[in-house]
């Protein structure tokens, strides 16, 4: 992959931003709405929302407390590699997941990823959401589920 321009900034390839994600970031830098980005890039608003949530999930304030939950989630990640946080909206699942991912990222040779499943309303779209967060492309004759499973297998 090559370096990408986002707005007037260079984003090195090691950041892991695809060309499409760079386009979404550039449009965000222009203060376009998700609908405007969707129209400009000929992608669905839901796809824009998915890119935005996976690219810009950084919290504005530090994460404080929830030591027991953080430890339990980190332990679950080490034991299971794929963990889903569930619960009612607004209880802090996303902040907890992002905090723990930042805590454990160095424990995994290939890093740690956050996949926002909030915009996913169709169960058939879970694997494509995961594939998108991992930066996996589409392969002819191969489902998103097979692609994700193949990437995770090693």
Image (cartoon, helix red, strand yellow):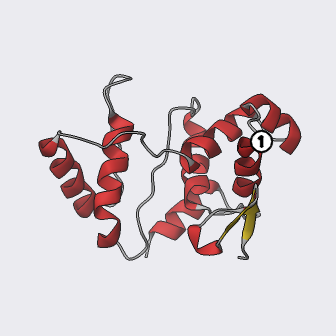
Q: Position of residue 59 (x, y in %)?
A: 42, 42
Q: Is residue 52 left or right of residue 141?
A: left
Question: Which residue lies most toward the left here?
Answer: 68
Quadrant, the C terminus: bottom left
Assign a secondary structure to mark 1. Answer: loop
Image coordinates for residue 153, horizontal then vertical, percent? 44, 71
* Left or right: 141 in relation to 112: right
Above or below 24: residue 5: below
Q: Residue at x 54, y 36 (%)?
A: 123
Residue at the image position 58 percent from the left and 47 percent from the top: 129
Residue that appears at 75% across and 50% down: 26
**Residue appearing at x 50%, y 38% in the figure:** 117
In the image, is residue 26 above or below residue 1?
above
Count numbered badges in the picture.
1
Instruction: Choose between 41 and 30: the one closer to the eye.
Output: 30
Going by the image, does 58 lie left or right of 66? right
Q: Which residue is mark 1?
A: 30
Answer whether residue 25 is visible to the viewer in this image: yes
């Amino acid at each position: 992959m090559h370096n990408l321009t986002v707005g007037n900034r260079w984003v090195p390839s090691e950041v892991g931003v695809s060309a499409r994600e760079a386009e979404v970031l550039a449009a965000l830098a222009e203060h376009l709405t998700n609908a405007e980005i969707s129209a400009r890039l000929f992608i669905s608003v839901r796809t824009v929302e998915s890119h935005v949530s996976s690219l810009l999930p950084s919290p504005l304030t530090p994460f404080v407390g929830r030591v027991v939950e953080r430890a339990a989630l980190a332990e679950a990640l080490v034991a299971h590699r794929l963990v889903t946080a569930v619960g009612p909206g607004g209880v802090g699942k996303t902040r907890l997941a992002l905090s723990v991912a930042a805590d454990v990222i160095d424990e995994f040779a290939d890093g740690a990823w956050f996949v926002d499943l909030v915009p996913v309303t169709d169960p058939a779209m879970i694997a494509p959401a995961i594939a998108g967060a991992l930066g996996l492309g589409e392969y002819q004759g191969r489902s998103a589920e097979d692609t994700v499973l193949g990437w995770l297998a090693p």
